[in-house]
Image (cartoon, grey):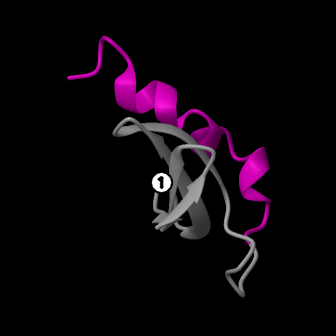
Amino acid sequence: MAEEEGTAVRNAICMWCRGWCPARVHIENGRLVGIDENPDFPRKPFPPLSACARAMAAPEWFYHPERL
């Protein structure tokens, strides 16, 4: 696990669609705070993960107050 300014960064695969994009998950105090592309992964997602509305909305989706 890598550390960047107090935030844990873990390698993962985003499975919200069939693209299975390589991602880095940023965790702070045990909570997801962001997702971005994993630059070390040999396959690059298309479109880029930074353009993916699902990936960018992940923290809001996980911690939305009306989520069951």
The three-letter code of the residue at mark 1 reads Trp
Q: Where is residue 19 in the image (x, y as percent from the top left)?
A: 59, 68
On the image, which quarter does residue 24 sit in? bottom right
Give me the residue at 78% from left, 46% from top: 51
Q: Where is residue 20 in the image (x, y as percent from the top left)?
A: 54, 69
Counting other residues with Cα less than 10 Å from the Cα at mark 1, is it few (<14), some (14-19), or many (20 or more)? few
Q: Where is residue 11 in the image (x, y as percent from the top left)?
A: 51, 68
Q: SS for tag 1?
A: loop
Q: How many marks?
A: 1
Location of the C terminus by quadrant is: top left
Give me the residue at 79% from left, 60% from top: 47
User: Viewed as shown, does residue 17 lie left or right of 52?
Assistant: left
Give me the residue at 76% from left, 49% from top: 50
| Magenta span | 45-68
Give me the residue at 52% from left, 58% from top: 17
- Residue 19 in sight from this viewpoint: no
Say whether residue 7 is magenta: no
Toward the left, the furthest residue is: 68
Toward the front, the furthest residue is: 5
What residue is disc 1 on?
16
